Image: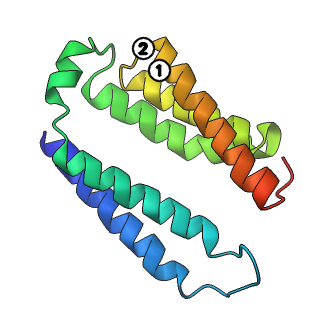
Amino acid sequence: MLWARIGALLALILGTLAIGLSFGLPKSEGPGPELFPRILGLTLVLAGGWLAFHSGDEEAKESGEKLIGWARALLLSLLFLFAPMTVSQLGLGVSAALAAGFTTWLCGESWLRTLVVAGVLWLFSYLVFTRLLGVPG
């Protein structure tokens, strides 16, 4: 429970910093460089707020986690260090979906929930970055 509170606090701090610092970025007509930090910051603030008030200990015991403690933390750290390297080969949507799916699986979720999370994140990144912002996929 302590690590969940620390993670929530870090997410709240980083999200607030991302939103605050995005106001210093240059403005443009339409979506500009400030959009992504604001989306990321808002996501971190919402996730941190949810995590701060959600007790995950009961769910962790029920889910029958396969990986615990330092092994899971090490794998998650390696995932987030190497995930950006896959963007140039796989594209943003597929890389984000793989990272989200693997993270969900490491947290002990079912295969169905893992696939749903990966699919929703792929669709979100496709709609926002490829369709709305015109970033090549």
Q: How many labels does the image show?
A: 2
Number of the label disc, if any, that sits on residue 55: none
Which residue is depicted at the point 71% across and 76% down? 32
At x 77%, y 83%, the residue is: 29
- Contact between marks 1 and 2 (CB within 8 A): the answer is yes
Quarter location, residue 59: top left
Residue 81 on image: x %, y %? 54, 45
Q: Which amino acid does label 1 sit on?
A: Arg
Q: Residue at x 75, y 77 (%)?
A: 30
Q: Identify which residue, 47 or 70, lies in the foreground.
A: 47
Q: Can residue 105 be seen from the camera position used here?
A: yes
User: Left or right: where does residue 27 sit relative to residue 74?
Assistant: right
**Along the viewing direction, whichever of 88 and 26 lies nearer the viewer:** 26
Q: In this view, does 122 lie above or below 110?
A: below
Q: What element carries label 1?
A: helix
* Residue at image mark 1: 113
Question: From the viewer's perspective, is 81 left or right of 106?
Answer: right
**Can residue 7 be spotted in the picture?**
no
Q: Which amino acid does label 2 sit on?
A: Ser
Indicate the colouring scheme. rainbow
